[in-house]
Amino acid sequence: MRSSRSGNAGESNRAEREELRISDAFETKDGCLEFTATMININKGHNQDLMEKCRMLKDYALFIDKVREYEKTKKTLKEAIDEASVYCIKHDIMKDYLIKHRNEVRDVLLTEFNAKKQREMDRRDAREEGRIGERIDFVIKKVKKGQNLEEISNALEIPPEELESIYQVVLEEAPKFNVEKIYRKILEGR
């Protein structure tokens, strides 16, 4: 059995410490090897005892906190990172490191923050795709029963204009009702 320790400067609302198991990522739990990692929340305001013992970790948490703070007021993430770097250098927070590696720090953070935003957008898109798929299935069932747009929209409690494109494409594809084809047509029409 292996274990590891990991720091988390991602979500600040996570627990102070969490034990993560690789087996939790799999549906079946019948593996013969387990890997555990203790994730320690290193966001500002968490694990103060650890932060007081490790200046670099504390400074990193302060720097990330400043990036997040400036991200709310700056036009771009790059500007927020640059502003946080200036602030931290001025206030002797990771000063030497930022002076030597400022561009690398900015590039890494831009990559990390952009990857996080991309994952969030992917999850949002997946939810939207699922919602469209459910609506297609529902409209097909109701059209097969002879219901019109008004009846279907009442049943779903959705305004008819939100269902109209799906309804029209479903009618065009009747009686075969190829769901994949209907889905593609709807996405192309957006």
Image (spheres, rainbow, N blue to C red):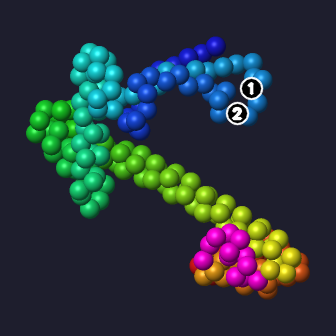
User: Residue 109, relative to residue 149: is it above or below?
Assistant: above
Identify the element where label 2 is drawn.
loop
Q: Residue 117 location in percent, x, y?
A: 45, 53
| Snapshot quadrant of residue 75 | bottom left
Badge 1 vs badge 2, beta-carbon distance below 8 Å: yes
Magenta stretch mostly in which secondary structure? helix
Determine the residue positioned at 64% across, 70% down.
Answer: 157
- Farthest right residue in view: 175
Q: Give the image location of residue 100, x and y in percent.
A: 22, 38
Q: Which mark is residue 26?
A: 2
Quarter placement of the N terminus: top right
Q: Quadrant of the C terminus?
A: bottom right
Q: Which residue bears the numbered disc 1? A: 29
Residues 151 and 144: in front is 151
Magenta residues, as a range?
Answer: 148-159
Q: Is residue 89 above or below residue 35?
A: below
Residue 9, by quadrant, is top left
How packed is label 2: few (under 14 Cα within 10 Å), some, or many (20 or more)? few
Residue 28 x/y as whole percent: 76, 30
